[in-house]
């Protein structure tokens, strides 16, 4: 599932509107990547979105 383990960002829904204004449902997936993180001396793999990676919430990236 596309969900960030740090901030909780997940799938969001909305409406796609064409040029002729026909409306249909759509969804946005967050940009989630697998990252290695050292927590209490143990390497763990977490799913993190690009914003969390960029904002140094994964400070101990290895």
Image (cartoon, rainbow, N blue to C red):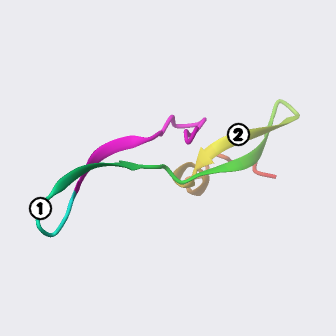
CB contact under 8 Å: marks 2 and 1: no
Callout 1: few (<14), some (14-19), or many (20+) C-alpha neighbours within 10 Å?
A: few
On the picture, is 51 further left or further right than 17? Answer: right
x, y percent for residue 32:
58, 50
- Judging by the rendered image, the residue that carries numbered circle 1 is 21
Q: Earlier in the sequence, mark 2 or mark 1?
A: 1
The Cα atoms of the two marked residues, 2 and 1, are separated by 40 Å
> Where's the N terminus, which quadrant?
top right
Residue 46 sits in quarter = top right
What stretch of residues is rendered in magenta?
A: 1-16
Callout 2: few (<14), some (14-19), or many (20+) C-alpha neighbours within 10 Å?
A: some
Residue 57, visible in the rendered structure: no
Assign the magenta stretch its main secondary structure: loop
x, y percent for residue 30:
49, 49
- Look at the image and say whether residue 33 sits in the magenta stretch: no
- On screen, 16 above or below 42? below
x, y percent for residue 55:
55, 53
Residue 42, visible in the rendered structure: yes
| Residue that lies at the very extreme toward the left in this rendered image | 20
| Residue that lies at the very extreme toward the top in this rendered image | 40
- Judging by the rendered image, the residue that carries numbered circle 2 is 46
| Residue that lies at the very extreme toward the right in this rendered image | 41
Label 1 SS: loop
- On screen, 50 above or below 48? below
On the picture, is 56 further left or further right than 21? Answer: right
- Look at the image and say whether residue 13 sits in the magenta stretch: yes
- Residue in the picture at 44% in, 41% down: 11
Of badges 2 and 1, the one in the foreground is: 1
x, y percent for residue 27:
37, 48
- Residue in the picture at 65% in, 42% down: 47
Front residue (pair 55, 13): 13
Front residue (pair 20, 31): 20
């Amino acid at each position: 599932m596309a969900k960030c383990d740090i901030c909780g960002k997940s799938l969001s829904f909305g409406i796609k509107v064409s040029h002729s204004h026909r409306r249909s449902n759509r969804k946005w997936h967050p940009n989630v990547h697998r990252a290695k993180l050292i927590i209490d001396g143990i390497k763990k793999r977490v799913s993190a979105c690009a914003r969390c990676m960029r904002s140094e919430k994964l400070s101990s990236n290895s």
